[in-house]
Every structure is written in C-alpha cells, then in structure tokens.
Image (cartoon, grey):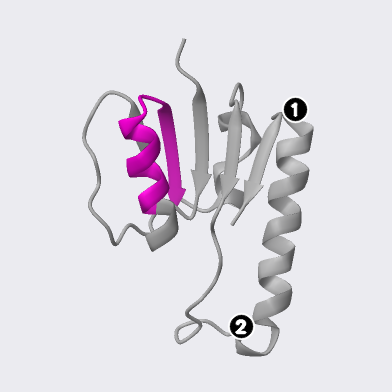
Amino acid sequence: MLKKIFITGAGGFIGSELVLGFNKLKYEVHALDRFFSYPILSNNNTYYYKNDLNVFGRKNLKNFDIFIHTAAITNYKNLDLKDNLFEKNISLIKKSLNLAKKLNIKKCYFL
C-alpha cells in the first residue's frame, strides 16, 4: 500500500520540490496551496488542492501517514499583514500541528 503524504505550501519552491521528490519515490501525494507557481504533475499518485488549510478542513485530511507543512505568508504586498506577519505564520504552524495531532497523523514535519 502506498504511503499517503499531505503537503501544505505545495505551490512554493520547497513544497513543489517535495511533491516531485515524493512522487518519484512512488508515494501518494496530496498537495495543498492557495496558488501553484511551479509545474503541476499529472499522474495517478498526485492530487492538487487549490485552497486554504482553514477552508480545506479536517474531513479531507484523514488517513495520512505523513504531514509536511511548508506553507507560510511571505508576500504581504496585497495583504494587510505587514505588521503582524510573524504572528500569522506562527498561528498557521500551531493550527497545522493541532490539526495533525487531532487526526492522529504519526509523522509531522515543519519546514
């Protein structure tokens, strides 16, 4: 049985490289981001979700072996977050960790 991996921030440089790497290793990869600026693979083992983790929700994150969090807000030009960018990113990490814990995902990585 294929190991299932969920990657947040999969549209960024690090996340997209992880998607490619795990795909080559024949893992079932589920990639989430609000945008995808790197090439998207089209095969049977990689699934893309253009969404926010808060919207994507707990019901879609069941039965994953590994959770990798690479999402972060790095560009605030169009957002009103300049003054609290650090706090927003820390909050995102906490939400991701709590979600993985509630879903009993055994391996979590934060990059």
Residue lying at 74% horizontally and 75% vertically, measured from the top left:
87
Which residue reaches farthest top? 1
**Residue 23 falls inside the magenta stretch:** yes
Residue lying at 21% horizontally and 35% vertically, measured from the top left:
42
Q: Secondary structure at mark 2?
A: loop
* Residue 79 to residue 6: above or below: below
Q: Which residue is mark 2?
A: 81
Residue lying at 72% horizontally and 30% vertically, measured from the top left:
103
Q: Which residues are magenta?
A: 16-33
Q: Is residue 12 left or right of residue 37?
A: right
Q: Secondary structure at mark 1?
A: loop
Q: Position of residue 66 (x, y in %)?
A: 59, 32
* Residue 83 to residue 45: above or below: below
Q: Is residue 70 left or right of residue 101?
A: left
> Which image quarter holds the C terminus?
bottom right
Q: Position of residue 61 (x, y in %)?
A: 59, 31
Q: Is residue 47 left or right of residue 4?
A: left
Q: Position of residue 35 (x, y in %)?
A: 37, 59
Quadrant of the image occupied by residue 45: top left
Marked residue nearer the N-terminal end (2 or 1): 2
Q: Which residue is mark 1?
A: 104
- Front residue (pair 26, 98): 26
Which residue type does callout 1 highlight?
Asn
Residue lying at 72% horizontally and 67% vertically, measured from the top left:
90
* Of the two numbered discs 2 and 1 in the rendering, the one whose residue sits closer to the viewer: 1
Quadrant of the image occupied by residue 85: bottom right
Q: Residues within 10 Å of mark 1 (few under 14, many from 20)?
A: few
